[in-house]
Amino acid sequence: MKKLIGLGLTYAIVQILIMTNAITGYLQATLVTICINIILAVSLNLITGFTGQFSLGHAGFMSIGAYVCALITMRVPTVYGFILGVLLGALAAALVGCLVGLPTLRLRGDYLAIATLGMSEIIRIIFLNMEITNGAAGLNGIPQFVNWTWLFTFTVGTVLVISNFIKSAHGRACISIREDEIAAEAMGINTIKYKVVSFTIGAFCAGIAGALYASYFYFLKPDLFGFLKSVDVLVIVVLGGLGSISGSILAAILLALISSYLQSFPEIRMILYSLTLIAIMIFRPQGLMGSKEISLSVFSKWASGLKSKRGRV
Amino acid sequence: MLEINNIDVHYGVIHALKGVSLKVNEGEIVVLIGANGAGKTTTLRTISGLKMPTGGTVLLNGADITNMSAQQRVKMGLSHVPEGRRIFAGLTVLENLELGAYLRRDKHEISKDLDMVYQRFPILRERRRQMAGTLSGGEQQMLAIGRALMSRPNILFLDEPSMGLAPLLVQEIFNIIQDINKAGTTVLLVEQNANMALQIADRAYVMETGSIVISGTGSELMKSDDIKKAYLGG
């Protein structure tokens, strides 16, 4: 209940700020970036942080969602077309995730990272050479349907789905694979199945993020979804803490704020950004949240002046 | 109850098991001993489905389970305590035990079994909220055994439960294994500590470089001169 009130308040406050023009163009774009990064980071956290499969292919799944949604909304420029685009984009990404996951998830660690990286590059090259995606020139003039309401709905939806998945028996199975794959198998857990399931759900959500991106920024080109995009997402996940959803959310917000604040120092912006990342990793090597979560009950405890030493309440 | 016939296993070009056959009857403690690299662990992993054989059959109560996956075998009542314990270090003791009952859906019975495990290992109840990685070696072994019992197995496979434990603890673990067996669970035990293992064994097999070389009852093997020389220190 408290959660519902908190979510409702967040939505309402931002909505009012947008309507009264307190949040203007640039801030709005930052807000969109934050939400998209939250979706990407939380879904990659499911794959890397909770299931323990090191993936560098998130940009690939994102691009599938983006292109599918863009192509559909350009032909059906209505809200229904947009919803259809998001869903089909996410489904296409999930399908590719599942098909790629089946053979590659037998690999471990660095090998899996290289395989997923290769997969993401293949997807990028395909988009670069296809007629329908307009190659390197990219797609222009994609109808813009994403507003704060859609953004909020999809972000909260993704986070809720993934956090509930992790709390379920299926999620427990995924975590046990991260902890010890052989023991998990000896417990009767179908490790291949759960690796593919978490990979597919992660890809699905990345597809949603891509679709939202396409519909808000109304311009797509394959370069946007290169290796560095995957690394960006991985940075958020590691910075927030592998295995912490609230960590991913926090890191996505923090990094977006840092990078928009640093706009005032254009020459040394990337240097400062990198130094900040290095400093955070030195002082919090386990990530901002480690594998812990913050919940609203923690806030209310803080509010009443009680300090709980246990992170998970 | 369990029977394997002429099992062959290869790791790449290495022929790890060469026609291994053995039998475990209901209610027995059967021990598999042998030197490093003899194929004991591989045999166990093949029986529990973690490794697929290149030839031969595995029968459980007469049914052929050779091509079944590990999780199907757990469902049929096989449970494996892997070598080196392999507990889930980042999860709590309770979460580890719950994962042992992963394939079961009967919540009421699971909580009964949880009580049974806590009764057998009171230290685990004390530490149920603690990260499993912070337990001592002996406690971790108890947790690994407790976790395996949570699937309510008919037959329990233990892979070197004495590894890395102090002698007193080893004695305790072996007592526990005997208790579990008396409570009705058939046990197949792989051990380097031949002396202790043969003491509690109903029957035993000795492996050497991928084959079974000697078999007999526990006491027979303890008296055998060859065994004494090779495994019991004179």
Image: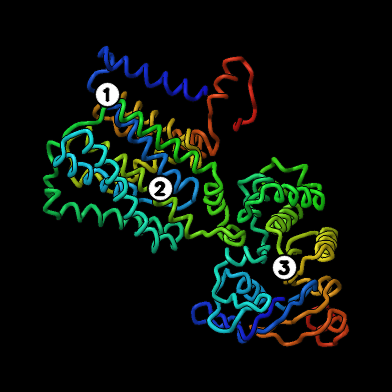
Disc 1 marks a residue whose amino acid type is Gln
Relative to B189, residue B38 above or below: below
Q: Position of residue A130 (x, y in %)?
A: 14, 54
Q: Position of residue A141 (x, y in %)?
A: 12, 36
Q: Position of residue A308 (x, y in %)?
A: 64, 25
Q: Which residue is mark 3?
A: B155
Q: Residue at x 37, y 56 (%)?
A: A98
Dot 2: few (<14), some (14–19), or many (≥20) neighbours within 10 Å? many
Please state if A192 lies on the left or on the right of A82 as rendered. Answer: right
Disc 3 marks a residue whose amino acid type is Ile
Q: Residue at x 57, y 15 (%)?
A: A303
- Label 3 secondary element: strand
Locate the C terminus of chain A by quadrant. Answer: top right
Q: What is the C-alpha distance between the residues marked 3 and 2?
A: 36 Å
Q: What is the C-alpha distance between the residues marked 2 and 1?
A: 28 Å
**Relative to the observer, which residue lies in front, B181 or B172?**
B181
Please state if A149 lies on the left or on the right of B146 as rendered. Answer: left
| Subunit of label 1 | A
Circles 1 and 3: CB atoms closer than 8 Å: no
Relative to B86, residue A42 above or below: above
Q: Which residue is mark 2?
A: A201
Q: Which residue is mark 1?
A: A28
Q: What is the C-alpha distance between the residues marked 1 and 3?
A: 62 Å
